[in-house]
Image (spheres, rainbow, N blue to C red):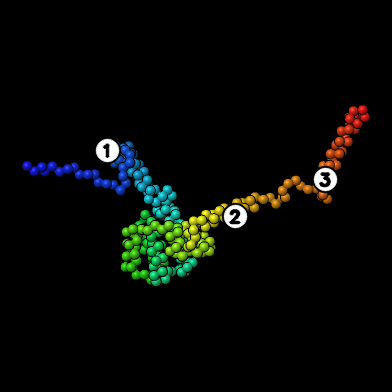
Amino acid sequence: MTNNIQPPALPRKSRYPITSFRDRVVRVDPNDPIAVSKARSAIADRYAAMSRRRYGARPTSSGIHWMAAKRINELERYLSHRYGHHLPDDDAGREDLVILANHVAQNRHDPRAKILGFIRRWAPWMVATEAEALADKVLKKPRRYRAKTLGGLLRLAEDERINLNIETIRPFGRTDADMVEDKKRKDRERKAAGRAANRSGRPRGRPKSEGGSKPWETSGMLATLDCATSNPSLSSSP
């Protein structure tokens, strides 16, 4: 006789695993306004935690992490400095456009439309079908770049980083020791500037008398004479 009993189905794995009882989804009475309000607050807290894990603790108003937004701003400054208003219609221009699109893809509010907007702005020569294919390819697996890797891809020079005020991209060819030394040098310069701003302009130490005389010696002698004349016992001989 064949046994037709099927084993129980395993629970479906969630992208965000349950870690505590408070994270469990519970059914509430829809006619109870207090229970519904608490359930909605719990759902809002869960989505907020998911957002912090994905976008960081300081998301901007546009729905993108503040560091990604800052790097996009720096990338646009660098591209404007290097190419002008638009990217060239060649392999180098397309490579830099892909780097920019990967950073824009970190936006959680309609990233595809934002990528297409950046493409229209920086590569108006690209046809719509190619732009859409590029956006779809980037959104399948957005790439995150380290500061050192990005500096090597862009060939960012040290003088360009200083002139363009770029802080999230490491210059090409700079080592960790060089970056640490630059940080120490900037710290010394900042402290020296602070000390210079706090100076009053007056010379340090006691103020010197005019002519280089020592008035305290004369006043001390006079004080000794006055004390001797006021007390006869000190001036009388034994």
Q: Which one is in front, 183 or 141?
A: 183
| Mark 2 surroundings within 10 Å by alpha-carbon count, few (fewer than 14), some (14 through 19), many (20 or more) | few
Q: CA distance from mark 3 to mark 2?
A: 40 Å
Where is mark 2, residue-wise?
189
Q: Earlier in the sequence, mark 3 or mark 2?
A: 2
| In-image side of 219 versus 152 (left or right) | right
The mark nearer the N terminus, 2 or 1, is: 1
Amino acid marked by disc 3: Lys
Residue 202 vertical position relative to residue 165 in the rendered view, above or below: above
Give 152 or 50, whichever is nearer the viewer.
152
Q: Is residue 162 above or below residue 3?
A: below
Q: Vertical placement of 24 versus 68: above or below? A: above
Per the rendering, the mark at residue 201 is none
- Dot 2: element: helix
Amino acid of disc 1? Asp
The residue labelled by disc 1 is 29
Residue plotted at (72% across, 50% down): 203
> Identity of the amino acid at label 2?
Glu
Quarter of the rendering containing residue 147: bottom left
Residue at position x 47%, y 68% from top? 82
